[in-house]
Image: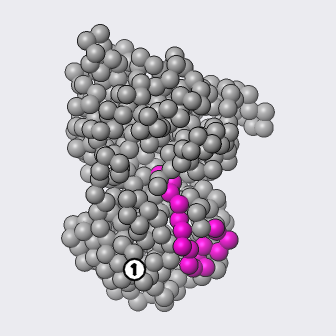
């Protein structure tokens, strides 16, 4: 059985990781490589680095940073944020990224998935879907951080992304993101019925129980989290031990 | 000197970085003479097996690889092209390992690609010196080599398949040792020093 994956997500702004606090044994929590190595040592299965730079200069710094991450980390890592062309994907692949995550750009131009997957393989392409459940009950994919609903319905869009060559779906419920109230597990389970590629659950984890729930009842293959790790509430290692006690197959 | 064969099948950077972390000297090459004179040869590869075979043919490397007598390690698609045949593109491969490469059939319970950390068991080679059966390594693939007499490690994803193969001086891993944390680094180190 392939183990359920735990994936810390690190936000990078102008070349520095943001949000991390409370790591007494790290000299520089703003250093993306050191923080990543810390997570890798504590049992992270993969890492996601999300570039939230607002400037072109920040983006260039990020590419340099990806090279340093690739040099220093011996587990797979995904990079995302601002990838809107095959050239962007090529630049990050050359820098050493194992996977790229695309979101708004794939909604605006779905054939971007085809072109990146055809060139570098499905394993390289994660399609991130930020979906919001509307008043009529329909889950709609959104862009621009959840602020703009698109014409894509969650399930249809996930199926389309798979057909176009996505290797994984990273699904965030914008109704739950940041609330720390848990994941919409029924929706995750329903999504799992519709596609055969792995699903990464993101947004909403407030406790170990929430993560256990989405990996079992929600049938997600991996859970991505940021704040519960960054603020030192629980280490990746302790989380995995807890999940193991709950009979969830994790690597630890 | 270690030779990493560059045959335009995906990025070699992660393999290069793993060797750098181990302090090993290497060269990235498609030159037959350099490959023939190397102490160790690595054949990485990500992507489509039929395309990988085509690229090896174009680079005139199929016979070169088959004739090597020093240790060779194929990784992922690099291992698959060392098998007999692959269902991916219905292609005949290098026929070093007596294994047939098949596609995983997805079901609601079986995600394809097989992506993530899975256990290796039935370890039967110095390649796994110091590594216990049941350790986790990182896989990303939709096709798998069947079990065969050359199997030296097994993994199960719906079916049990060859996680690693060995025939004489040829080794192959379906998983990515260069992405498998400390366990993977140990496997690469074993390949460099112990086989």
Specify whether B97 is left or right of B93. right
Specify whether A50 is left or right of A234. left
Residue that appears at 47% across and 65% down: B155
The quadrant of the image that shows the N terminus of chain B is bottom right
Which element is circle 1 on?
loop
Residue that appears at 65% across and 74% down: B129
The quadrant of the image that shows the C terminus of chain B is bottom right
Specify start and end residues of the magenta stretch as a single range: B116-132
Residue B101 sits inside the magenta stretch? no
Instruction: Kindly tell me whether residue B152 is visible in this rendering.
Output: yes
Toward the viewer: B171 or B152? B152
Residue A145 is situated, as x and y percent measured from the top left of the image, at 41, 20
Does residue B22 lie above or below A108 as drawn? below
Does residue B20 lie above or below B168 as drawn? above
**Residue that badge 1 annotates:** B148
Q: Residue furthest right?
A: A24
Residue A15 is situated, as x and y percent measured from the top left of the image, at 57, 33
Specify whether A5 is left or right of A158. right
Instruction: Kindly tell me whether residue B36 is visible in this rendering.
Output: no
The quarter of the picture where residue A160 lies is top left
The quarter of the picture where residue B189 lies is bottom right
Does residue B18 lie above or below B53 as drawn? above
Residue B165 is situated, as x and y percent measured from the top left of the image, at 46, 77
Residue that appears at 59% across and 61% down: B135
Q: How many marks?
A: 1
Toward the viewer: A77 or B58? A77
Residue that appears at 60% across and 56% down: B181
């Amino acid at each position: 059985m392939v183990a359920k994956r735990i994936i810390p997500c690190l936000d990078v702004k102008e070349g520095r990781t943001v949000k991390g606090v409370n790591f007494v044994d790290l000299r520089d929590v703003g250093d993306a490589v050191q923080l990543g190595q810390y997570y890798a040592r504590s049992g992270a299965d993969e890492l996601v680095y999300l570039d939230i730079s607002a400037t072109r200069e920040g983006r260039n710094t990020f590419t340099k940073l990806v090279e340093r991450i690739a040099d220093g980390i011996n587990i797979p890592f995904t990079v995302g944020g601002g990838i809107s062309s095959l050239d962007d994907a090529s630049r990050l692949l050359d820098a050493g990224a194992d996977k790229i995550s695309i979101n708004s750009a794939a909604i605006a131009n779905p054939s971007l998935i085809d072109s990146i997957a055809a060139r570098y393989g499905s394993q390289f392409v994660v399609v991130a879907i930020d979906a919001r459940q509307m008043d009529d009950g329909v889950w709609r994919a959104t862009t621009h951080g959840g602020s703009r609903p698109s014409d894509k319905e969650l399930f249809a869009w996930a199926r389309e992304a798979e057909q176009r060559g996505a290797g994984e779906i990273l699904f965030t419920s914008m109704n739950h993101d940041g609330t720390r109230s848990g994941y919409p597990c029924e929706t995750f389970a329903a999504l799992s019925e519709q596609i055969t590629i792995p699903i990464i659950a993101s947004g909403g984890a407030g406790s170990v129980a929430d993560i256990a729930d989405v990996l079992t009842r929600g049938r997600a293959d991996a859970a991505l989290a940021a704040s519960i790790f960054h603020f030192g509430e629980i280490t990746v290692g302790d989380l995995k031990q807890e999940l193991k006690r709950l009979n969830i197959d994790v690597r630890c | 000197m270690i030779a990493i064969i560059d045959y335009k099948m995906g990025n070699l950077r992660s393999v290069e970085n793993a060797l750098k972390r181990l302090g090993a000297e290497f060269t990235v090459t498609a030159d037959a003479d350099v490959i023939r004179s190397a102490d160790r040869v690595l054949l990485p590869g990500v992507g489509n097996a039929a395309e990988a075979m085509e690229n090896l043919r174009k680079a005139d490397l199929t016979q070169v690889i088959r004739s090597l007598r020093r240790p060779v390690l194929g990784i992922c698609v690099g291992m698959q092209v060392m098998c007999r045949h692959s269902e991916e593109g219905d292609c005949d491969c290098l026929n070093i390992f007596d294994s047939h490469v098949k596609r995983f059939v997805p079901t609601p319970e079986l995600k394809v690609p097989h992506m993530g950390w899975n256990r290796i068991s039935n370890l039967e080679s110095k390649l796994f010196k110091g590594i216990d059966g049941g350790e986790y390594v990182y896989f990303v693939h939709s096709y798998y080599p069947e079990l065969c007499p050359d199997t030296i490690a097994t993994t199960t994803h719906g079916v049990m398949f060859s996680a690693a193969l060995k025939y004489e001086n040829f080794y192959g891993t379906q998983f990515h040792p260069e992405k498998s944390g400390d366990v993977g680094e140990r496997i690469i180190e074993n390949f460099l020093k112990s086989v």
